[in-house]
Amino acid sequence: MPVKCEQGGDLEAQADSVADLRNERFAFTGNASEYFRIWIISLCLTIVTLGFYSPWAKVRKRRYLYRSTRLAEGSFDYHADPIAILKGRLIAVVLLALYVASSYFAPGIEAFLGFAIFAAIPWLIVRSRMFNARYTSYRNLRFRFDPVYGEAYTVIVGWSLLAGLTLGLLYPHAHYRRSAMIVNNSHFGNLDFALPNVSGGFYARYVQVSLLMLGVLIVLGVLATLLPSDGVSIDDPGSAVAVTAVIIGLIVAMGLAASYLGPAIAKLVIGSMNIGDHRMNCHWSVPRVVFINFTNLVAIALTLGLAIPWATVRLQRYQFENMSIDVAGELDSIIATQADEVSAMGEEIGEAFDIDIGF
């Protein structure tokens, strides 16, 4: 079918635009031995000071990891004030102590505090994002995150309720809406982050995980047929082996689903987002990330935690060295946009109550 001249002109313009893009790969220059020294000194000082050094430890560790992450001959940095983190952490510890104490002395207050913490989750997520963005920089330009409290409650609470009412059928879309809220309200200088509508990609990842779980359950069903028809006897070695295999298989299935879904969603989000006219690319192999996470966990367990620095550097290196950005024009042309100082309280309370604030 012939192409019209106007369309040909558009195609030429698009080709020129693509040709103008310059691919820049991320690099991670961190060293496990260097990071281990920072980590072990920070751990010892945190123990000696009964935890008061932990904000300084957090800043030192993040600063090393951020400064070891490079792009186009520039590096990232972390500028948070440990004193601000300490204040937020003390408030978080007080709230956590009140919550735990109320379970013993005032069960009614415990329920109220639990509801208050649950109701504050969207606020905590926004505050945490604002804090981390404000104190993260690239080439001395700061990131920022909009104070979208109303949108956070609509997306996190509203869409979660809809997902529940539809028996989970809308959950992948609700997950996409949360990720879109995080990406679309992030900025770097005068550049806006943007995530296109990839809701279908979220559904595809959830279907993949469901099929993985289904495959494992089928295998477990086959193993269950090995059980004796007249019941399980603890004195029968065959029965004991079969029951153990079924239980281990179920645990492995749940672990695989959790470890696969997180990297798969992160790869989709990172690889789909735009930063102004610049386009992000994510080249992770999700099975490879799952393998790295699993072997890291084994190494940490076998070394009683001493392998944490090695595991952290190993994962960071793989993730960043398999990411790139198609740059349109020059990064030096970005205009810095100032943002207000942000309290660390939201992030620290979120950590104290183990609230997930990722994609």
Image (spheres, rainbow, N blue to C red):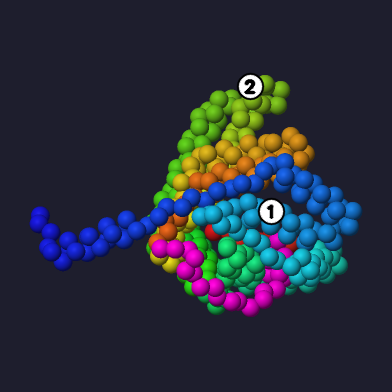
Which residue is rendered at x = 58% and y = 27% of the image? Answer: 227
Quarter of the figure with residue 357: bottom right
Q: Residue at x 22, y 64 (%)?
A: 10
Q: Residue at x 42, y 59 (%)?
A: 327
Q: Judge by depth and name the residue closer to the eye, 245 or 93.
A: 93
**Which label sits on residue 238?**
2
Nearest to the eye among marks 2 and 1: give it: 1
In this picture, is 68 found above or below 301?
Answer: below
The boundaries of the magenta stretch are: 329-351
Q: Quadrant of residue 98?
A: bottom right
The one of 220 and 157 positioned closer to us in this rendering: 157
Residue shown at 67% from the left, 21% from the top? 237
Which x, y percent locates residue 136? 62, 64
Quarter holding the N terminus is bottom left
First in sequence: mark 2 or mark 1? 1
What is the spatial separation of the Cα atoms under label 2 and label 1, in whole angstroms? Answer: 53 Å
